[in-house]
Amino acid sequence: MRSRCPSISSWSKRPDMQALPAQLEQGEVDVFVGLSDVAEHGWVGRTLFTDTFLAAQRKGHPRGGRKLSLSAFCAAAHLVVSSTGDPFSGFVDTALAKLGRRRQVVMSTESYATAPALVANTDLMCTLPGRLLQRFDASLDLFAPPLALPKITIRAYWHPRSRDDAASVWFRTQLFQAAGVSVR
């Protein structure tokens, strides 16, 4: 973005979901990027991408590079990314519970950005969106999870007030292009 607009400044942070509706309405936040289940009625949104999940472990992990069985998955020590609710349980644990299984979650982080580095330098395993993990395939072994998991859809949302604002339209266009979404 800076090559196209050298005077731009942007700030990316994890939102306070309680304050977000008011922040979008008041123009304190231009765009929220996240899951569709948190969107407020009336926000304008567009899908950035839909992805499947992959399981990851570090290259040279003691488990080796064998196909990942459900038993091996459950026996492994796991890292979970969680910013709400129980920090040691997530959607994978819900899917496992439906099968009468559990995994061993030993570490939690609030940041998707730090998770691949944590896994690459420990004997932990994680399950994250494939699009994220594939960027770290030089240091991680990636596997299809041994259980059915839903796809993840990431969307961009903004307040209708900024729909036609030139600066907001430009910023969203840059965001769509970075995500590989065709610009309408």
Image (spheres, helix red, strand yellow):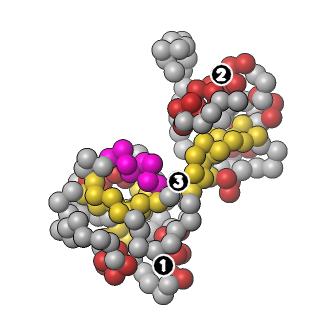
Q: Give the range drawn in magenta.
A: 129-136
Viewer can see residue 79: no
Q: Quadrant of the C terminus?
A: top right
Determine the image quadrant of residue 80: bottom left
Mark 1 secondary-structure assignment: helix
Q: Earlier in the sequence, mark 3 or mark 1?
A: 3
Instruction: Please give the name of the residue rendered at 56% of the width and 30% of the height, measured from the top-left corner.
Output: 177
Instruction: Please give the name of the residue rendered at 79% of the width and 24% of the height, measured from the top-left corner.
Output: 164
Instruction: Check whether the beta carbons of the residues at disc 3 and disc 1 lie within 8 A of each other.
Output: no
Q: In this view, does 157 lie to the left or right of 123?
A: right
Q: Residues within 10 Å of mark 2 (few under 14, many from 20)?
A: few
**Residue 170: image x %, image y %?**
65, 22
Q: Read off the residue under disc 1.
A: 96
Q: Residues within 10 Å of mark 1 (few under 14, many from 20)?
A: some
Q: Which of marks 2 and 1 is nearer the N terminus?
A: 1
Q: Read off the residue under disc 3.
A: 51
Please name the amino acid that badge 2 sits on: Trp
